[in-house]
Amino acid sequence: MGSGAVVLGVDVGSTSWKGVAVDSAGRIVARRVEATDPRIEAQTERLAAELRAASGAGDDAPLGATGYGRKRVPAATRILTEITCHARGAYHLTGRPGVLVDFGGQDTKVIRIGDGGEVSDFRMNDKCAAGTGRFLEVILARLGVGLDQAPELVARAAGEVAISSTCTVFAESEVISLVAQGEPLPAIVLGLHRALAGRVATLAGRLVDGAELFMSGGVALNRAMADALAAAVGRPITVLPEPQLVGALGAALSVMQSDR
């Protein structure tokens, strides 16, 4: 493998573009994260050039692409599935099997990872926003609450206001009604987190039985969401380092392995 053994991995998600440059030891030596631009091809060309410049990789450095926009990365050496890349990235970071919950903006994936980092089973919610990060994003925005403010509000909650709607649109109307009724904002935000965590726990089902749990994706940056999910499944959950980059890391590692 050329280019100083540096490879690139990009994960083009519905809300965020994530990219990494990885050296021969599997260390991330450069990273980029941006909101996904509709002009994915141009965005990827620009950010891949930045990754190459920051890592010292040459123009011929291999590039693995994953995510919903992976087929719009013309420079990709390999096009890879999200499930495989997230499993590989998580196993590389932990060195052990377990179950990964990847909280994305468009979908949520629950992946059972075997002893060698292979995918042994998975479940995915990609039909409804109510079980994804979009659920929180839409409703918190309607409440005038930034994602970075959510953990502080949850910590201040004296109790929970349950959110019963299972649809993002209906839940949005429900929380507006709750605000109008004078319910405390922290209690509503806590209820939102617990509602989302409950849906993901239902999605995971028995897939999590007897396994160590890990969490990745942009939503994993929200500590309150990780705590809510841990409570919903009744088990501790470890948030992986740089959780947004796990899929991109897995894409880079997949290319690196294929080149050896």
Image (cartoon, rainbow, N blue to C red):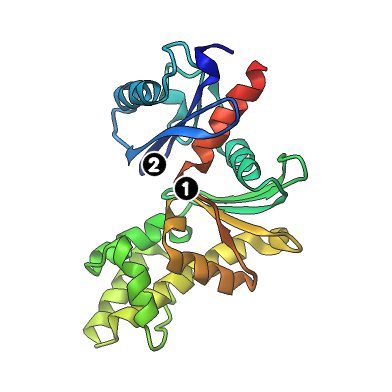
- Residue identified by numbered label 1: 242
Q: Nearer the viewer, residue 24 or 136?
A: 24
Q: Is residue 110 left or right of residue 9?
A: right
Location of residue 256 by image quarter: top right
Q: Are marks 2 and 1 in contact (CB under 8 Å)?
A: no
Q: Residues within 10 Å of mark 1 (few under 14, many from 20)?
A: few
**Amino acid type for the residue under numbered disc 2:** Ser
Closer to the eye: label 2 or 1: 1
Q: Quadrant of the N terminus?
A: top right
Q: Residue drawn 31% across and 27% down?
A: 43
Q: Residues within 10 Å of mark 2 (few under 14, many from 20)?
A: some
Residue 164 vs 212, above or below: the answer is below
Q: Give the SS element for disc 1.
A: loop
Q: Residue drawn 55% across and 31% down?
A: 251
Q: Nearer the viewer, residue 34 or 14?
A: 34
Q: Where in the figure is residue 45, as x and y percent of width and height?
A: 34, 21
- Residue identified by numbered label 2: 14
Q: Quadrant of the C terminus?
A: top right
Mark earlier in primary sequence (2, 1): 2
